[in-house]
Image (cartoon, grey):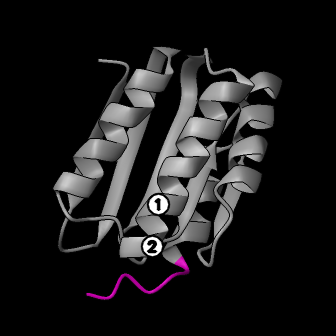
């Protein structure tokens, strides 16, 4: 499975790790899972360290539209994206622009920096 995630309800945290080739359907499956679990408001880390990003600009538009739709029905929690390759960083930057809203989003090159930033937000627990 290209994206695996864990949900910590006590910490109000979702950690997603992408591996292998990351495609639109993989991101959509992850987003569906998060929405169905009713954890859109949780803090999230999306780690693409071990993934090859196979998303084109049209895919990113679809993802951005879906995120904006979620914003209409739910509060979205802060999102830390870990992108170590230049290509993944560029796609994460495009996502940041396309899914712009009233929640914090920040891109990191290292997972521990992403976690430190995310931990600064109140988990609500």
Viewer-closest of 47 and 53: 53
Work out whether residue 115 can be spotted: no
Work out whether residue 34 can be spotted: yes
Please give left or right for residue 57 compared with residue 27 in the image: right
Please give left or right for residue 101 compared with residue 40 in the image: right
Residue on which the image places disc 2 = 72
Region of the chain picked out in magenta, as a range: 120-125
Q: Position of residue 50 (x, y in %)?
A: 54, 21
Please determine whether, in this image, residue 27 is positioned above or below residue 70. above
Residue 15 falls within the magenta-colored stretch: no
Where residue 54 sits, quadrant-wise, is top right
Taking the spot 56% from the left edge, 49% from the top edge, the residue there is: 65
Q: Are marks 1 and 2 in contact (CB under 8 Å)?
A: yes
Residue 69: give its label.
1
Distance, label 1 to label 2, CA atoms, is 5 Å
- Which quarter shows the C terminus? bottom left
Please determine whether, in this image, residue 1 is positioned above or below residue 82. above
Mark 2 surroundings within 10 Å by alpha-carbon count, few (fewer than 14), some (14 through 19), many (20 or more): few
Viewer-closest of 50 and 70: 70
Q: Position of residue 103 (x, y in %)?
A: 59, 75
Where residue 122 sits, quadrant-wise, is bottom left
Mark 1 surroundings within 10 Å by alpha-carbon count, few (fewer than 14), some (14 through 19), many (20 or more): few
**How many badges with numbers are in the image?**
2
Please give left or right for residue 45 compared with residue 95 in the image: left
């Amino acid at each position: 499975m290209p994206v695996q995630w864990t949900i910590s309800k006590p910490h109000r945290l979702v950690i997603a790790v992408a591996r292998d080739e990351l495609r639109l359907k993989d991101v959509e499956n992850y987003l569906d899972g998060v929405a169905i679990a009713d954890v859109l408001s949780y803090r999230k880390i999306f780690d693409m360290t071990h993934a090859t990003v196979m998303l084109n600009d049209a895919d990113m538009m679809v993802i951005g539209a879906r995120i904006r739709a979620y914003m209409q029905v739910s509060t979205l929690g802060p999102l830390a994206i870990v992108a170590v390759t230049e290509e993944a960083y560029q796609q994460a930057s495009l996502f940041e622009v396309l899914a712009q809203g009233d929640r914090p989003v920040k891109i990191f090159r290292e997972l521990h920096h992403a976690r430190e930033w995310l931990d600064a937000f109140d988990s609500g627990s």
